[in-house]
Image (cartoon, grey):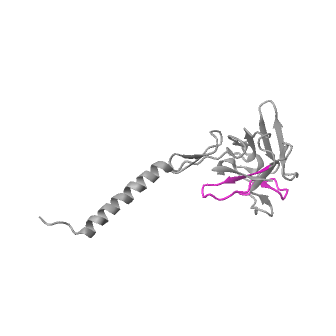
Amino acid sequence: MKRAPKGRAVRALAGAGVIALASLGSALASNISIGSSAGEVEFGQGEFTLKVCDSWIQLNLLSGATGQYGAPAGLSALTGITIQGLNAAQCKSTQFTIEAIDQGLNPLPIYRIDGKSKLCSESPCQVGDTAESELVFQVSSSGVVGLRTADLYRTMTFDNSIGIYKIVFTKPAQLARDITNLTIQSTAL
């Protein structure tokens, strides 16, 4: 019986060692936690949770009556967005930006700023010129929630009895059905 060359045995042993270390490192990485249990960040294995200022914020679409604002019969315009679960006391000095996204992952214009009462599908509009695709609101250092800049094209109200903020567009730009996702991003003021 012939013996395997020493170089081959050493390579096999080194390979087994690398595999063992990689397996051990993977198992250890899945259990590394930083922070308290309330704001835990876990690295490894794809789990990642960060708590910025609130545990959750829910966004919902508000749609108008069918056929309103130039929408085809049976369809509704996106007339606003509701925000539920925002804890202003925990989110002081924070700015939030909401965008409506279509199926192609493109931002959509959500309200018109040119005074027209027609949707962008009926009367074309250009983001930044005749329509806006971002909706920005802020929580001040004293905990007051409001739109970043007030204008005639959108209003924000708060229903204290149910804890819901409502942003309404006076000149909607999109059909509600065209909105695939709403995104919200936060930044410190």
Identify the residue shown where x is 84% and y is 59%.
Answer: 114
Which residue ends up furthest to the front in the rendered image?
Answer: 6
User: Bounds of the magenta span?
Assistant: 94-121
Q: Is residue 64 visible?
A: no
**Viewer-nearest residue: 71 or 1:** 1
Q: Position of residue 97 (x, y in %)?
A: 75, 52
Identify the residue shown where x is 86% and y is 43%.
Answer: 142
Position of 66 relative to 161 (above/below): below
**Viewer-nearest residue: 139 or 110:** 139
Q: Check if residue 99 falls in the magenta segment.
A: yes
Q: Is residue 184 visible?
A: yes
- Residue 50 is left or right of residue 136, and the answer is left
- Residue 188 is left or right of residue 51, and the answer is right
Q: Position of residue 179 (x, y in %)?
A: 66, 50
Identify the residue shown where x is 75% and y is 40%.
Answer: 86
Q: Quadrant of residue 127?
A: bottom right
Position of 70 relative to 62 (above/below): below
Q: Quadrant of residue 133?
A: bottom right
Which residue ends up furthest to the left in the rendered image?
Answer: 1
- Total marks placed: 0
Q: Position of residue 143 (x, y in %)?
A: 84, 42
From the image, give the main secondary structure of the stretch colored magenta: loop
**Viewer-nearest residue: 83 or 41:** 41
Q: Which quarter shows the N terminus?
A: bottom left
Q: Quadrant of residue 36?
A: top right
Q: Check if residue 6 falls in the magenta segment.
A: no
Q: Position of residue 59 (x, y in %)?
A: 70, 43
**Viewer-nearest residue: 16 or 124:** 16
Position of 60 relative to 1 (above/below): above
